[in-house]
Amino acid sequence: MTTPHPLRRRTALGLIALPAALALPGCGGGTDRRRAQVRLVNASPGYASLELRIGDELKQAAVPYGERAAYAEADPDKPEVTVFATGSPTALLRFSPALGNDRWLSVLAYGPAGALRALALDDNRGEPDAGRAVLRVVNGAFDAGALDVYLTAESEGLDTAVALQAGAAYGAAGDWQTVASGTWRLRITAAGSKTDVRLDVRGIELASRAITTLVLSSSPGGVLVDALLLAQRGAVVARANAQARVRVAALLTDSAAVSASVGGVDIATGVGSPAVGEYVRVAAGVATPAIRVNGATISAPLLAFEAGRDYTLLLAGTPAAPRVVRLLDDNALPRDSARARLRLVNALADGATVAALTLDFAPVGGSVAGDAASEPATVDATATGRIAVTAPGAAAPLFVATEQVLRAGAVHTVFVAGRSDAALGILRRDR
């Protein structure tokens, strides 16, 4: 006899996707209808504060990110709902959700600045049995892509764990899942991966008969995610990421070998220059990286690593005089999935040469000082791109590469390193 899996799938109830300017029909006639109850939940890190109007009346003002407003009455015969950034006269969303007799509704606003979306969540689901809780997932993390969601015991590894929800797509809400009430460990990974962890938080409490929506939102770096636990007709509990991602760009001259760790976590071990490593998750906070070049310990500054962000730990210069620089990386996806993002990191050995980047002779990043990066630019995707790095007054480009691939929907960095008279370039797809 097969033992039932402890996570039992149930069908989602009353979920309506509401992109901007989408109108849904009202409930119909009747003059004795009781009023509906509507509240705004701000799950968009792109908007510090939102407000909600029903008809022409301001019902909920200054709802900060990660919070919800108190319910407000709405006339089912006049259901138009409008969402604004607080203090702005321009509507971000306008729609007419279906409102029923004495029904409760949460308007979940999510997504990046300039592309706000909403889901209308029906807050009328019946309670599960005693000793059980129900949970559904809304992936509101635009930059993170599809995600797998795991609820496990505290010490349980992911190797044999089964996802509560696999492949949660952006803008979609999953079915209700029934789990045992209690305290869980929540881990979010990239879809199909058990090693690309985007969030790892302990102490997720799901009380007996709890009805909870888990909302995922993008972190500042674009890859890690944060979580909001929205109780039906109740409060929002934020569970923010406590980690950052750091990689090493070992771009010293003379093939120097580099080892580095941050907060006791190894991020490079005997890496030969030039090389750009993979991102590694480390505890957010301030730390002095431990760095060795050709086996010798070198001095490094005290650096801050903010939760949810991505960083490159750049080692440039010569083995005898290495420079250690922390670069902030923006790995948010391009808003247009048919395009790409591209930037330049200037790691030239002298640290004084200013560099500029072009793609097919069009400027992308100009006047980038030594040991610095340009702002990412949105560019056309290409399989035949010509990338060039130039320096003011130089007779020829420092570096040229043709037939370069910039993938649609991806983020890329061009690193230029070495001596100016023999510079090398590395095109790296960051995600």
Image (spheres, helix red, strand yellow):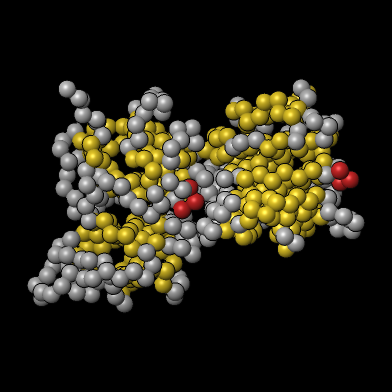
Q: Above or below — where is 265 with respect to 128? A: above
Q: Residue at x 48, y 47 (%)?
A: 144
Residue 285: in sight, yes or no?
no
Q: Quadrant of residue 360?
A: bottom right
Q: Quadrant of residue 256?
A: top right
In the image, is 269 to the left or to the right of 371?
A: left
In the image, is 355 to the left or to the right of 243?
A: right
Q: Above or below — where is 352 with respect to 100? A: above
Residue 254: in sight, yes or no?
yes
Q: Residue at x 45, y 32 (%)?
A: 194
- Residue 259 in the image: state x and y as whole percent: 70, 27
Front position in the image: 4 or 261: 4
- Residue 372 in the image: state x and y as whole percent: 73, 49
Q: Quadrant of the C terminus?
A: top right
Q: Quadrant of the N terminus?
A: top left
Q: Residue at x 43, y 46 (%)?
A: 146
- Residue 125 in the image: state x and y as whole percent: 19, 50
Q: Above or below — where is 114 with respect to 407? A: below
Residue that protrudes farthest toward the bottom in the picture: 56
- Residue 318 in the image: state x and y as whole percent: 83, 35
Front position in the image: 264 or 351: 351
Q: Above or below — where is 17 with respect to 12? A: below
Q: Residue at x 74, y 58 (%)?
A: 358
In the image, is 385 to the left or to the right of 162?
A: right
